[in-house]
Amino acid sequence: MAGGGTTLEYTPTWVVALVCSVIVSISFGVERLLHRAGKHFRKNDQKQLFRGITKDQRR
């Protein structure tokens, strides 16, 4: 970093924990969104969209 900002060594533990918690929360939210989108796509028979958000590459 230019300017000699604070390093992780001097960052308070609660700040590190907060940032990690935010990242984990966003990850869970995105996973939940993809799960609900997949259920919606299967329910409405939109196979191509469902296949696009899953690893299923079968034709």
Image: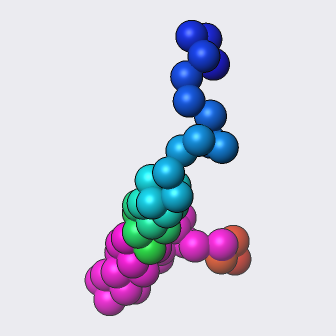
Q: Quadrant of the C terminus?
A: bottom right
Which is more toward the observer, 6 or 26?
6
Residue plotted at (59% across, 41% down): 10
The secondary structure that most of the magenta stretch takes on is helix
Outermost residue to the top: 3
Left or right side of 47 for 6? right
Residue 50 is situated, as x and y percent measured from the top left of the image, at 47, 74
Left or right side of 33 for 24? right
Which is more toward the observer, 29 or 41?
29
Rendering quarter of residue 9: top right
Residue plotted at (45% across, 60% down): 14
Can you say whether 55 is above or below 26 in the image? Answer: below
Residue plotted at (57% across, 10% down): 3
Which is more toward the observer, 47 or 31?
31
Residue 44 is situated, as x and y percent measured from the top left of the image, at 30, 83
Residue 40 in view in this figure = yes
Can you say whether 2 is above or below 29 in the image? Answer: above
Is residue 51 shown in magenta? yes
Left or right side of 30 for 13? right
Residue 19 is situated, as x and y percent measured from the top left of the image, at 46, 55
Residue plotted at (55% across, 22% down): 5
Is residue 33 shown in magenta? yes
Counting labels gives 0
The colour mode here is rainbow
Residue 4 is situated, as x and y percent measured from the top left of the image, at 60, 16
Left or right side of 58 for 30? left
State the extent of the magenta-drawn residues as a range: 29-55
Q: Quadrant of the N terminus?
A: top right
Residue 19 in view in this figure = no
Can you say whether 12 is above or below 47 in the image? Answer: above
